[in-house]
Amino acid sequence: MTLVNFLVDLVSLSIRGDDMKNVTDSFLSWGYWPSAGSFGFNTDILSTNLINLSVVLGVLIFFGKGVCASCLHVCKYNLLSLSDLLDNRKQRILNTIRNSEELRGGAIEQLKKVRARLQKVQLEADQFRVNGYSEIEKEKLNLINSSYKTLEQLENYKNETIQFEQQRVINQVRQRVFQQALRGALGTLNSCLNSELHLRTISANINMLGSIKEKEKK
């Protein structure tokens, strides 16, 4: 049996999961019998090194499946956990972008309406340039001012929303810090009160012992 055939047998057995007896049979069949009734291996140094290498590779392939499967299972679990975390962060970012896009879309829609009205006013101005020029110009200025006010209101609303969220987070942090400080202060106060009460008790006991001794002397 050649080296290639032996390696093929080992790989096929490791993939199919056959018992170890087949591996032993394949390994023994690769030996040769130099004379009738005797068994031996090739004593050539290079061939022997190849034999050792092939045996080690075969054993690693045969017995390494379980370890590889466990490693793959752990890696798969870690990848799933990382994927869930990334999905949550991605969803938050997408929600923030979606809200910004909605505000931006509203502002763009408002600008489109303003531009349409301005175009209409300009057309009317071209038609009634002589008679109603001053009134049309006034309307145009009013539209422009109204547009700026609308955009300013949208910007203020966005800033107020951001400030509200920031203030809410700050208040939550302050509340937690205050609670922790209050707990620490109460713990310190209780410790001080316990120490003071202990000292008062000792002092009272000393005074009582002193008065008892004085009475005994009398």
Image (cartoon, rainbow, N blue to C red):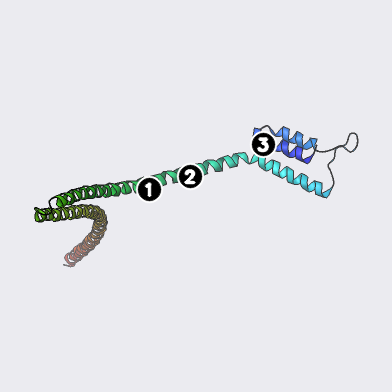
Count residues near mark 3 (Cα–Cα under 10 Å), then give few for <14, some for 14-19, many for 20+: many
The amino acid at mark 1 is: Arg
- The answer to which of marks 3 and 1 sits earlier in the sequence is 3
Give me the residue at 32% from left, 49% from top. Answer: 97
- Judging depth in this view, the residue of 215 and 179 nearest the camera is 179
Which image quarter is the N terminus in? Answer: top right
- The answer to which of marks 2 and 1 sits earlier in the sequence is 2
Question: Percent from the top left, x then y, of residue 127?
Answer: 15, 50
Question: Percent from the top left, x then y, of residue 11?
Answer: 69, 38
Circle 2 sits on which residue?
A: 79
Question: Quick check: 203 left or right of 54?
Answer: left
Give the alpha-carbon distance from disc 3 to disc 1, as whole Å. Answer: 42 Å
Give me the residue at 69% from left, 35% from top. Answer: 12
Circle 1 sits on which residue?
A: 89
Question: Percent from the top left, x then y, of residue 166?
Answer: 25, 55
Give me the residue at 24% from left, 47% from top. Answer: 109
Tag 2 secondary structure: helix
- State the image quarter where residue 215 is shown: bottom left
> Which mark, residue 14?
3
- Judging depth in this view, the residue of 218 and 26 nearest the camera is 26
The amino acid at mark 2 is: Leu
Give the alpha-carbon distance from disc 3 to disc 2, as whole Å. Answer: 27 Å
The amino acid at mark 3 is: Ser
Tag 3 secondary structure: helix
Tag 1 secondary structure: helix
> Which mark, residue 60?
none
Q: Is residue 18 above or below residue 89?
A: above
Q: Nearer the viewer, mark 3 or mark 1?
A: 1
Which image quarter is the C terminus in? Answer: bottom left
Give the alpha-carbon distance from disc 2 to disc 1, as whole Å. Answer: 15 Å
- Judging depth in this view, the residue of 103 and 131 nearest the camera is 131
